[in-house]
């Protein structure tokens, strides 16, 4: 069935009948797919292969005394780098550094560190359980915490006699309460969107294992090899005279190496070989590109899995046979597409995202150098908006390619055309759920960090750690906050990918005047420009007039 434009589907608050579930078209490309964008895959392999090959060469040709040469004893010894020397310096002495007592550290901190990390993981799993079973409770808890935490801080300040300082937290709490009250309709929409995403995630639990596996694969296959390659390359060089010195090479001890201000500086500096700097730039490119590629693979797999779930044949959707196996096969099918015929497309998309990262970094550097130049500030704001739009369209192009199997350019045109017809709805899905969920993750992590502070600072066992209880509590509080935020951000990112993918499936459905999943349409039609799904007396489904704020809600659609 050829998709119809929205203008043909809906006009003047009424719409043409939607195709019922039993006769909807399967938009997802389930058959064999054609390999796309092969040139970009070859380009990525060339960049990554060159980076790894350079690391192997760097390790083979490294200075064998690198560790000794960069030690404190070497860089503060004028004899290690006579003035104007360019030859490798091999030390005569082998200093014996004092060993680090890792056993002493672990004996004090391992239990509390395990508590911090275990609690962070438990919070993440609890977050996921709430998403799956009670999105309303999750959103309500997040909103309550964003109001309660400033109130708790204000109360603590009042109890300590700092009533004036409590005005700030009280103002923040009141402002948050007012904003959430004014946005209550949008928050209700977010609750329903998160609920649908949680249902889709519950139908495909393998997505969580897939995302965790990709993170682990990124660390083992990308981050560590490139880090080792860069370090091996950096070990190619020698000690040279420190140009910051002004003693003219007359120093005989480390304390006599002085700079322009008369302060003591390092006598020597490590100078890598000439090829190392451009090679490290290549390693940086390979690292960023690979990171964006892993992100694109995750996004693609999520979208493909959700697309298979959304457009599942009617018989399969009503069949109760082997649901777990069906869920796993959906994830594996999408992952095979991502690592197979669509890998070139993902290399292309990740290259665009990599370019955006470099452009943003260059823009930020230029902004700092420009200072308070108002014209440049305006230009920078415009460019940031353009970069964000390109990133948004690229991500949706990857979603579209996951469902249709198109190359990036064709998928980009299809996704852009689709989003143009659903602009306001796409905008609502773009900014509403991320704002609520990311705030939820931050506040929950902050609350967990504060709880760790209270347990640690007022607990009876902090004296066993050595040092002040305040410093120990601060250290593990920071660890708890960072770990909690990282875990919650991971789950939020996965959930937001599902929200976007379900929206794209809904937009494809609406574009084709179909209603593949009535329960999804019943939620997404709460977006600004679409009315509710209703069933006509003849049994056909159609979109009614949009429900405006203050208007009575339509009766629920009959299934």
Image: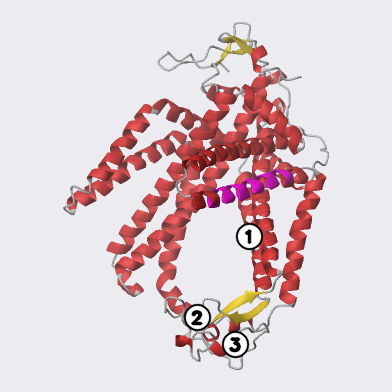
Disc 2: CA contacts within 10 A as few (<14), some (14-19) or many (>=20): some
| Residue 82: mark in rendering | 3
Magenta residues, start to end? 348-365
Q: Position of residue 23 (x, y in %)?
A: 72, 18
Disc 1: CA contacts within 10 A as few (<14), some (14-19) or many (>=20): some
As drawn, which residue projects farthest toward the left? 161
Q: Secondary structure at mark 3?
A: loop
Camera-side mark, 3 or 1: 3
Quadrant of the frame with the C terminus: top right
In-front residue for pair 189/286 = 286
| Residue 1, visible in the rendered structure | no
| Tag 1 residue | 219
Alpha-carbon span between mark 2 and mark 3: 14 Å
Q: Position of residue 249 (x, y in %)?
A: 54, 86
The answer to whether mark 2 and mark 3 are in CB contact below 8 A is no
Alpha-carbon span between mark 1 and mark 2: 44 Å
Camera-side mark, 2 or 3: 2
As drawn, which residue projects farthest toward the top? 537
Q: Residue at x 67, y 33 (%)?
A: 307
């Amino acid at each position: 069935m050829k998709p119809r434009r929205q203008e043909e589907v809906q006009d003047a608050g009424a719409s043409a009948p939607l195709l019922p579930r039993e006769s909807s078209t399967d938009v997802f490309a389930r058959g064999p797919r054609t390999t796309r964008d092969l040139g970009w895959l070859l380009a990525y392999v060339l960049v990554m292969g060159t980076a790894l090959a350079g690391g192997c060469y760097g390790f083979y040709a490294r200075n064998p005394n690198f560790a000794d040469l960069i030690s404190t004893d070497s860089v503060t010894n004028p004899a290690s780098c006579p003035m104007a020397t360019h030859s490798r310096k091999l030390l005569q002495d082998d200093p014996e550094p004092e060993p680090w007592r890792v056993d002493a550290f672990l004996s004090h901190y391992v239990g509390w560190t395990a508590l911090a990390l275990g609690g962070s993981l438990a919070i993440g799993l609890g977050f996921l359980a709430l998403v799956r079973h009670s999105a309303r409770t999750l959103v309500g808890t997040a909103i309550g915490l964003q109001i309660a935490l400033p109130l708790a801080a204000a109360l603590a300040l009042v109890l300590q006699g700092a009533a004036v300082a409590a005005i700030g937290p009280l103002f923040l709490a009141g402002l948050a309460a007012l904003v959430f009250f004014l946005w209550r309709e949008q928050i209700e929409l977010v609750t329903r969107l998160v609920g649908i995403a949680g249902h889709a995630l519950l139908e495909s639990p393998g997505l969580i294992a897939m995302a965790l596996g990709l993170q682990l694969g990124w660390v083992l296959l990308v981050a560590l090899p490139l880090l080792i390659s860069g370090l091996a390359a950096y070990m190619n060089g020698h000690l040279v005279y420190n140009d910051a010195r002004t003693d003219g090479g007359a120093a005989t001890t480390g304390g006599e190496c002085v700079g322009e201000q008369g302060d003591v500086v390092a006598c020597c500096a490590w100078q890598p070989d000439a090829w190392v700097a451009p090679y490290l730039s290549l390693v940086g490119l390979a690292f960023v590109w690979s990171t964006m590629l892993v992100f694109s693979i995750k996004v693609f797999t999520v979208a493909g899995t959700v697309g298979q779930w959304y457009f599942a044949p009617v018989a399969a959707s009503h069949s109760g046979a082997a649901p777990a196996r069906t869920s796993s096969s959906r994830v594996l099918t999408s992952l095979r597409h991502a690592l197979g015929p669509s890998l070139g497309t993902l290399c292309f998309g990740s290259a665009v995202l990599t370019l955006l990262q470099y452009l943003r970094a260059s823009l930020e550097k230029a902004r700092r150098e420009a200072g308070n130049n108002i014209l440049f500030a305006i230009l920078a704001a415009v460019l940031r908006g353009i970069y964000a739009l390109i990133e948004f369209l690229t991500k949706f192009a990857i979603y579209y390619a996951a469902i249709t199997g198109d190359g990036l350019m064709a998928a980009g045109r299809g996704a852009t055309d689709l989003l143009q017809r659903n602009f306001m709805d796409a905008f609502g899905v773009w900014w509403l759920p991320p704002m609520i969920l990311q705030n939820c993750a931050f506040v929950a992590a902050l609350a967990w960090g504060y709880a760790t502070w209270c347990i640690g600072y007022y607990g009876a066992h902090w004296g066993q750690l050595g040092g002040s209880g305040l410093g120990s509590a601060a250290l593990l509080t920071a660890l708890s906050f960072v770990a909690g935020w990282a875990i919650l951000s991971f789950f939020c990112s996965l959930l937001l990918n599902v929200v976007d993918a379900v929206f794209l499936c809904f937009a494809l459905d609406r574009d084709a005047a179909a209603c593949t999943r009535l329960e999804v349409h019943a939620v997404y039609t709460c977006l600004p420009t679409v009315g509710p799904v209703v069933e006509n007396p003849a049994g056909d489904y159609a979109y009614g007039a949009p429900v405006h704020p203050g208007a009575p809600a339509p009766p629920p659609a009959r299934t």
